[in-house]
Amino acid sequence: MNRRGERATDSGASNDASLGAWLSSLRFSGFTVLIVALITGGAIIISPSLSTYVQQHREIAELRESVRQHRESVEEIDSERARWKDPAYVRSQARDRLFYVMPGETQLNIIDDVPMPVESTEETNASLARMDSDWARGLAASVLSAATTEAPPADASDTGADLAPEPAPTEEPTP
């Protein structure tokens, strides 16, 4: 038995019956239906306006953030303009960017693009090697010999370069 003095049953039918009994015990008056209809209608009418309100507040927040970023960029530009009014800053930028020097100074540009190994095993020779060939004469001789040759272009086997491919061997049918 439960608290009301009714017997508790394990079947689902009694639960459905009790739910049905509860629903049938509810009484709706015309006033209750009118209030529910007014609240539902008001929610439907207000929802687009509420959506617009939320969207406009989001846009206002984005615009405020944009204004803040623009103000920061304006402050950066103002500070850079103030730096450019300083003659020492202008002089240092001319040295760094345009490689200008003051009269009487000597500028040395060090290019550090080729790193040298720390310990090299190569030995350097104190005397420079000199080639005893005339490259201009060799070039002229090569051009003249190529221009005055009697051989056809396909017969260039004397230079060591084989330009024409060898034909592939064919198999003859055996009788």
Image (cartoon, rainbow, N blue to C red):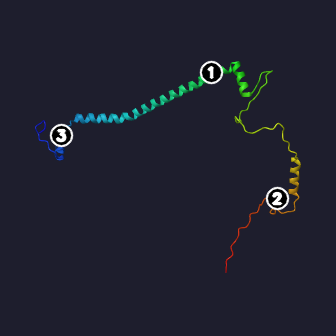
Span colored in magenta = 18-23
* Left or right: 20 as drawn, with respect to 64: left
Q: Which mark is residue 58?
A: none
Residue on which the image places disc 1 = 79
Task: Please name the predominant secondary structure of the magenta segment in the image.
Answer: helix
Residue on which the image places disc 2 = 159
Residue occupying image coordinates x 73% and y 25%: 95
Q: Is 76 included in the stretch rendered in magenta?
A: no
Q: Secondary structure at mark 1?
A: helix
Q: Which mark is residue 22?
A: 3
Cβ atoms at labels 3 and 1 below 8 Å apart: no
Residue occupying image coordinates x 88% and y 53%: 141
Compute the Cα span from label 1 to label 2: 71 Å
Comes first in the chain, label 2 or label 3: 3
Query: Is the residue 105 above or below the residue 51 in the image?
Result: above
Comes first in the chain, label 3 or label 1: 3
Compute the Cα span from label 2 to label 3: 111 Å
Q: Nearer the viewer, residue 65 or 91?
A: 91
* Percent x, y of residue 145: 88, 56
